[in-house]
Structure formats: structure tokens, C-alpha cells
Image: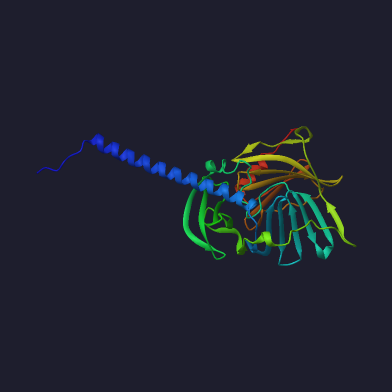
Amino acid sequence: MQPMRYPRFLLCAVLLLVGLHAQSSRADNSRELWSLLDNSHEQAKALSYSGLLLTQSGDYTQASKLLHQSGQGGEFEVLERLDGPSAKWIRHNEDIQCVLPEKKLILSEKRQTSVAFPRLLSNPDGTSMLVKLYDIREMSAKRVAGRSVRVIQLTPKDDLRYGYRFYLDRLRNLLLRSELFSHKGEVLEHVGFTEISFDAEAAVKPEMPQAGPGWKVAATEIRVMREGELPYNLPDIFVGFKRSDTLCRIKGKESQIHQTLYTDGLSSVSVFIQKANDGHSMPQAPISHGAVMSRSEVQGQYLVTVLGEVPEKTLGLFLKSVRWKSQ
């Protein structure tokens, strides 16, 4: 008896349908993972929690204690450094105070960006930009701080940014650990909880500190610069990074620094521009501190510095992106 032979066009149709189903399943899975990251970012703002953090970037290691409370008054957050000189950052919504007890000094400033662990997105539009810049997939399950987590990996589609691994609490979807890795797979920086509790609402409500006898209070004046005030132009979107406002940090008439922040939704790059000092010595190579790199060069009368958790190639492109109006 001869084996049944199917027409070639029928076999092709079956293979096509199988392929389309597989693509559809992958697309559905990717959408679910992107939504998971969006939700994790919101959970970091909405939940109350406290715990111990460990940050490692290159040779730098820092232990700290974090308390976050969310309620009718908005967000309260206290981050206390446990290693080295005592320092504590207290935030109520957008108001931040840094308390330095050894110097009897309180520094005040308005928060300019919402990126701070365990929040993970720097773009108010969520993950919309990231879909075009990173491939997403779920890795094998792990445990962090004694809790079961889902591991989401983002791999860049170009060589202008690093990759990320996010460890999300399986029950509450809070980010418990974040890793930044190079194109070679080397972990450049990681920050995460070693202990965590979700009973922070029972803790004492933090308050913004008041200066006592002998203490000093200092505040950096920050204002948004209008385009007509700037002697240069910067692109609105550059190699997948979106520009925010240019801010002027004023510490005196002779000390004004412009800062323009770019972000792709995860990675951030800051462009600093200030008047160059006579005889300013320039480093011969980019300065690296773990994942953070910076490059500087004098352009005419100004010193331009680019800093961010991005590869050296990206810093060089941003240095070349400045266009001076007088030229």
C-alpha cells in the first residue's frame, strides 16, 4: 500500500500557520512582560516597604537602609547610608533633603527625575520607547532576599546602551534586584535588597528635618532654561534617547552649570555645559566608575561633560551632538 502523499501547497500552508502561531505566541508573551515592567514601576510608588540594600558598581560597594511609605500624603522615603560618613536622604513627593550630621548641614533640592531603585522607568510614557530598543525575554526563576522572583532580561538591539536584568517579586511585583550588564555579559552594576519587609506602614511616619542650633541649610537654585537663552542647540531625540528640559544649577554668579538629561526609558545620559576655566586640565581618557562613565572636552569657551551608564561610544556621540549658535 502506497503511503498517503499530501499536496505540497497544503504542507506549506500548515508550516505557515505553525510559524504564524509561534510568532503570535512570542508577541503575546513579550506584551505581557512589558506590562509587567510597567506595573512594577507603579508598585514601587504605591507600596509601603522597608529593607536593606546593597549596591555594587565596579570596586564601589555601599550598604544602605530604605524606608518607603505611600498614603494620602503621597510618598515618603528615607534612604540612609550605613557605610562611611553618615548621610540620610529624606523625600516627600518631589522635595528632597540630604542630611549630613557630621557637617551639621542640610541640603535641599527638588527631584528632577523619578529614577531611583526600586523604580525602574525614567520615561513618563512607560515602556513605549523600550520596545524599539531592547529585546525582552523571561529567564529561569530565582530567589532574592528569601523571596521567589521572576527574572526579566532586556538585551539592547544596538551597541549604544547596556543590558538589564530585573528580578521582580512574584507576589507583589516589586523590583527586588537590578543588574546592568555589558555586551560581553559582564555585570557592571547591581543593586538589590538583601532583606525586605512589607510592613512599612506600621513604622513611624518620616518628617522633613529642621535645622537645629549650629546647623546650616543650603539649597541649590534650579531653573528651567528657555531655548533662546542657550548659546547652543541639542537634538530633541538622539540615538534612541529623548531629551528633557535644560536645567541651570546656580551656586553663584560665576558658578552656573547647565544640565540636559536624556533617557531611552532606562538608560540615562546627562550633558553638562559650563564656562571653561583658564588652564583647565583635561583627563586623557574617559573616567569610569563601574557602569558610570564620563567624558569631557573644551568646546570654545565652554566645558562640555557627558555622563551616564552607557558605553564610551555613546558618550562620544553626545559630545559631537552639541551645535553652537555662534558657529
* For residue 20, side relative to residue 70 (left or right): left
Is residue 13 depicted above or below 66 in this figure?
A: above
- Between 131 and 286, the residue placed more toward the observer is 131
Q: Is residue 64 left or right of residue 98?
A: left
- Which residue does the image show at 64% across and 42% down from the upper left? 124
Instruction: Identify the image quadrant of the N terminus.
Output: top left
Q: Position of residue 20 (x, y in %)?
A: 37, 39
Residue 214 falls left or right of residue 300: right
Is residue 57 visible in the rendered image? The answer is no
In the image, what residue occupies the spot 77% across and 32% down?
Answer: 228
Q: How many marks?
A: 0
Query: Measuring 68% from the left and 53% from the top, which residue is drawn there?
Result: 70
Identify the image quadrant of the C terminus.
top right
Q: Quadrant of residue 246?
A: top right
In the image: residue 166, left or right of residue 286: left
Residue that sits furthest to the bottom in the current view: 83
Work out whether residue 162 or residue 154 is closer to the camera in this orientation and state it: 154
Res 15 seen here = yes
Q: Position of residue 136 (x, y in %)?
A: 50, 48
User: Quarter-wise, where is residue 211 in the image?
Assistant: bottom right
Question: Could you say where residue 113 lies in the image, as x and y percent from the top left?
Answer: 69, 47
